[in-house]
Image (spheres, helix red, strand yellow):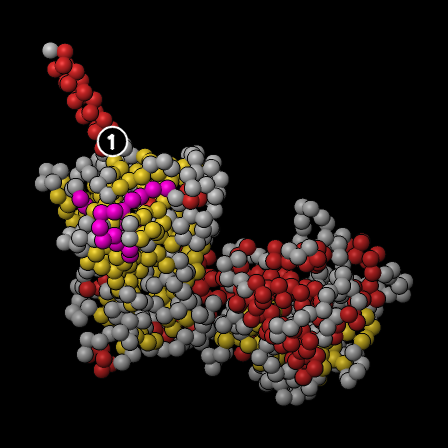
Amino acid sequence: MENKSTHIIFCMAFILLLSDCATIDTISANQEIKDGDSLVSEGGMFEMGFFSPGKSKNRYMGIWYKNISYGTIVWVANRETPITDKSGVLKLGRHGNLVILSSGNPMVWSSNLSNVSVSGGSNSNNPVGVVVKLLDSGNLVVWNNQNLIWQSFDYPGDTFLPGMKLGKDFVTGLQRSLTSWKSPDDPATGEFSYIIDTNGYPQTFGWHGEVIASRFGPWNGLGFSGFPLEIENHVYITEFVVNEKEIYHKYELISSVFTRVVLKSDGKGQSLQWIPRIKDWIVYADALVDTCDRFSLCGPYGMCSNNKHPPCTCMHGFEPRNQEEWRASDWVSGCIRKRRLKCGDGDVFTKMTRVKLPDTRRSWYNASMTLRECETICKRNCSCTGYANLDIRNGGSGCLLWFNELLDIRDYDVEQDIYIRIAASELEGHVDSQVPIQFQPSENNTYSGASNFIRSATYLCNDNRYMLDENSGSLHMEPFNDIPYFSLLEVARATCNFSASNKIGEGGFGPVYKGVLEDGREIAVKRLSETSEQGLDEFKNEVICIAKLQHRNLVKLLGYCIHQNELILIYEYMSNNSLDYFLFDETRSLMLDWPQRFNIIQGIARGILYLHQDSRLQIIHRDLKASNILLNSDMNPKISDFGLARNFVGQDTTAKTKKVVGTYGYISSEYAVHGRFSIKSDVFSYGVLVMEIISGNKNKEFSHGDHRDNLLGHAWRLHREGRAVELVSRSLHASCVSSEVLRSIHVALLCVQHLAEDRPTMLSVVLMLASEGALPQPKQPAFFTGESHSEVQSVSVVNEYMITQLYAR
């Protein structure tokens, strides 16, 4: 009887021991998993071990469901390196690495950890404190004293599980994406993949090899644009996160239902749901629903709809690029505009409702802007082809802009709208009518009443041309030679009577209006303000100087208008406003990446070189600053505002004045204190401009918690300490080219040196920016500190006879 009891107790203990071994979920450095053994998650949901897929005899280490759908594989470690026998072993290796070994291959697979801090030391073969654990989520993790150092969820295969992230980690550079198996018998990486593309606003592409097969539109707050939304979802919640550190998409279960997303070896993406009643998976949703889900089926500006036959049509304002191909049901070439864009008021935005938003790889976005602000920015940029709300919840919010051809648009049964730029003449019922002119005074000009406007119109109809008399200030009936004259009637008509809605800015000269001439040309109109510090001299100077200057980096003067108190300059219109409009605005500065800024830096340098050396009139600008650098539709810079410019002849490169004019923060020390200006004064201003372009900060407003230096002093300090790259604006970190940035900072410091004779010429500046040769070391800059009184004392004492005035403009 005693022997029988002992036998029963022994059997029970053995069964319990087997049970414990079968449900182990963790191994440490002194344990291993051999082929035939397994890890089972604590709740029994997942199991991990070696397996052979389908008809294959190869062995792989993988994770599969245990309690449901036994044998459904969700992750494979050694996808590309199968084991041909049952000698495989999983264990912790050197540095805390998770490794798979076999008799025929000493290193089948590794988690590739190289710098993990473990209790046993980085060179320990058996690091203490590191464990491997299989979680009930299906995630295999490596822990070091409760700190996660590796997880299988960071390396997805063909299955997307709840809690897993798909996307990119910008800190580690890790890209998490789905990749299909080669076949049901071979888990090696197949031909199909789902990858979140982080160019522009993030979106998910389905790839077949190197060809885009499908696209999930951008996240709109409720789901992916173009993918059917569920009105009620009690199974899971989805999350899409975009920040500086990472971009990812994941979903979490909120019920007891089990789901998984799988990318099959034939390229089909499916969301599957486990049904306990039938003990099988059912297809909950297909990634590709219909023909219109093929990427860019209808080409640029084409619209796909399954409710039409054929499914492709051109959007309003567009027509097929190739009619023969279109009739043959080959729509890949897409559509083109019926009428060319004129930009500005010559264009309008037409609303398209219930559509899948276009490809966003060439887009820009901001989550805090309103739709009206979004329209304003798009309208100002002639290369902007459309805009939309980023988030469609609660009436819509955020801004999404497109800057290229619009691809992959289809009908979409959700209130998702986009506004497409088309020529105004495309609008139904549009008439190019002439608005009757009613002259209205500028707020800053003085007139004697309405009768003056009638008389003005009468006088201007005579098409007389005027010339200024510098002594009396009166006007003579003499034209500026070779400079087009515009009547006030023409200018008023072009600007809608100087309408406030046409006003695009205000400078030291006066207000600036946008206008459209009768021949369709867009113009910028500068109207002298009565309160302006500038007047007849500056007006004449501007006309004479700029009319004789022709360079791609100088703004072009189209003509002028003079009548009574009215002094007006007409320029080519710059659709992207001035450099400061983008540079010093936290949101708009994101639209200027480093390649664009470097192009601007070089363009300004070439423009100044032309003024100093290559033009018929050798010009010192004297007022170079961010607001006087205009940007055209391609974001190319053009120097403007020559009201304060002075010409010099031959070697006469230095002059002196009792009246110092310019803008605080940009003028050189010898000019501010002694009134001496030269080409080196412009070089100094250029150096300040480059610092501002790189840092995104204004020199005169810069402050730092550790010192009282201005922007120039701060840059000088960082350069000496070998930390010049810290000057770069955070918005440029993703796009900057370090060598170009550091060279630009170095050149800028050479330009702002204290002594004018130490500064390079603009020819040297252009050559230094374009080359890779060694640069001379810069000396201390002028105006080293941000304190105004220190600036003067650090340079010199102001001479008693000299009148120094800084005119804010």
Say which residue appears at 41% left-offset and 71% top-offset. 347
Q: Which residues are magenta?
A: 71-92
The percent position of residue 633, horizontal first and vertical second, equals 49, 72
Which sits in the foreground, 319 or 615? 615
Which sits in the foreground, 256 or 565? 256
Q: Residue placed farthest to the front in the image?
A: 3
SS of the residue under disc 1:
helix
Say which residue appears at 23% left-offset and 36% top-offset. 45
In the rendered image, the vertical position of residue 358 relative to residue 14, given as above or below: below
Q: Quadrant of residue 420?
A: bottom left
Three-letter amino acid code at disc 1? Answer: Cys
Residue 85 seen in the figure: yes
Q: Quadrant of residue 40?
A: top left
In the rendered image, the vertical position of residue 54 relative to residue 280, given as above or below: below
Label 1: few (<14), some (14–19) or many (≥20) C-alpha neighbours in 10 Å = some
The percent position of residue 518, horizontal first and vertical second, equals 48, 80
The percent position of residue 682, horizontal first and vertical second, equals 71, 71
Q: Residue placed farthest to the left in the image?
A: 278
Which sits in the foreground, 542 or 60? 60
Say which residue appears at 22% left-offset and 33% top-offset. 22
Residue located beneath label 1 in the image = 21
Q: Number of marks in the image?
A: 1
